[in-house]
Amino acid sequence: MSRLFHSDHFRLLFATLLGSFSVLGFAPFHVFPATIVGIAGLFYLWQQAPGAKQAAWLGFFYGLGFFISGIYWIYISLHDFGGMPWWMAAFSTFCLCAFLSIFPLLTGWLSKRSSLVLFSAPLLWALSEWIRGWIFTGFPWLAIGYSQTPNSPLAGFLPVTGVYGVSLLTAAAAALLVLAATRWRRKLALALLVVILISGALLKMLPWTSPVGTPVSIALLQGNISQDLKWQQGELQRTLDIYHQLATDTAAKLIVLPETALPMLSQYVSADYLASLEAHARNQQGDLLYGVVEYENEAFYNSMLSVGSSPRQHYRKTHLVPFGEFIPLKQVFGWIYRDWLNIPLTDLARGGFHQQPLAIAGQKVAVNICYEDVFGEEIIHQLPQATLLVNTSNDAWYGQSTAAYQHLQISQARALETGRMMLRATNTGATAIIDRNGEVLAQLPHFRTGILEGEAQGYAGSTPYILFGNWLFLLITASGLLYLLWRGKKK
């Protein structure tokens, strides 16, 4: 058995399995120790690897197992709803996973070049996730800090360092497990691990923000419109009728419809239809938010618009999904959409980067649309002014996969980072009310038409993350890496 474990092929296979195992820390599984153990297994393989090249390949195969298991649902959006041939959708999904696996590849290569693999690996891992969060517009999905949300003691650090800081601590916990299992300083490693966990648990008890005003009654609408029918002209009236019925069936003061709930241009929405929704919202002395596509100055925007007691306002999506909402290098990749894909609204314009919260229903609501809540450093641009966070999404693109559950977990992290409640109104799920501690208070079943009613408390104040964003994490990481460089030169 020992001989088998030392086989290069077996180690690559084992690294791949460790990557898949690590996904159990994420929703819908929420086995947060699994991610720590999976990363610890990879770090052990890196420590035992004979050189940097071998460590790099181990990182790459770990990444393949991790990302293929974690974001396999990209295939569903491309093939089932985008109309791409199965082999092309599978190849495209694999290519994305292979590209993302370059980050653990580089982390393994650089870590092994250091004399302190278990010190450098957590720092480089977290730094690589931060870079992955902005390079080529960013894809921070499955940052390992999310695996600790909201149940792990490490989630207590989210209001302080943000998700990348929790990624650093998750990786550090993994490194300490390896030290405890393989080194003579076992007691010190275990003591440091206990200190980190206790510190996180204590931070969870701190009320970073304070209630402001009285709770507001809310209704989050889930229309459950099948993605393959959503943009068909023959389904338009049925969709409008469903949302009109849901909206008028609730007496909530703040009513929220999902992203592009009305699948049409805003100027084509009937004046009578909007007047009816507006009158209903005014009768409740509140407001209604609805998703629609705006067209202005020859540009299309993915927007949320309000009607009701307050003046009409809008929020336009800023962070667009590459290849989903805009085409990077259109002259190079445009043929893919012409010949292979059938995805509407692939050439949207960006909204303003410094949009302010919407003053509706007695609250200051920081709206973010779908993919935007993956970027915590952008959410805080509307804080501390905002009292509530609202995310509107349409995850029907990914079918009955783990995508919507992972997205909900990401929203839970945003609530913890900001000390604000997060309200999620989605087309097919996960429609949910999340408290400022990241706990889901109520949720509609997926793929059911319904109304989620409840109360939302506004909050004021700033967490350290609101004040400093990712700078505290970057300062810690840079300090650690500079120490490694200094130590290497000293030798």
Image (cartoon, rainbow, N blue to C red):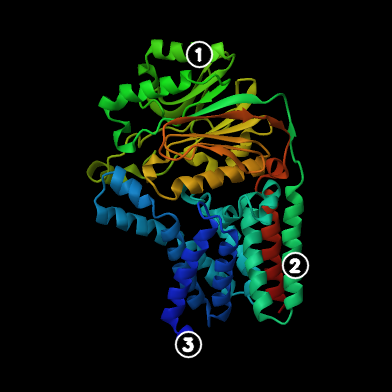
What x and y, as percent, mark residue 317?
A: 48, 33
Gap between marks 2 and 1, in whole Å?
Answer: 57 Å
Which residue sits furthest bottom?
A: 3
Please tell me which residue is depicted at 47% across the width and 18% down the height of the picture.
Answer: 248
Circle 1 residue? 280
Q: Nearer the viewer, residue 111 or 446?
A: 446
Q: Which amino acid does label 3 sit on?
A: Met
Vertical comparison of 313 with 482: above or below: above
Dot 2 falls on a residue whose secondary structure is helix
Q: Which amino acid does label 2 sit on?
A: Leu
Q: Nearer the viewer, residue 450 or 433?
A: 450
Dot 3 falls on a residue whose secondary structure is loop
Please tell me which residue is depicted at 64% across the width and 20% down the height of the picture.
Answer: 362
Circle 3 residue? 1
Give left or right: position of 98 versus 88.
Answer: right
Q: Nearer the viewer, mark 2 or mark 3?
A: 3
Q: Is residue 265 visible?
A: no
What x and y, as percent, mark residue 162?
A: 65, 49
Dot 1 falls on a residue whose secondary structure is helix
Quadrant of res 209: top right
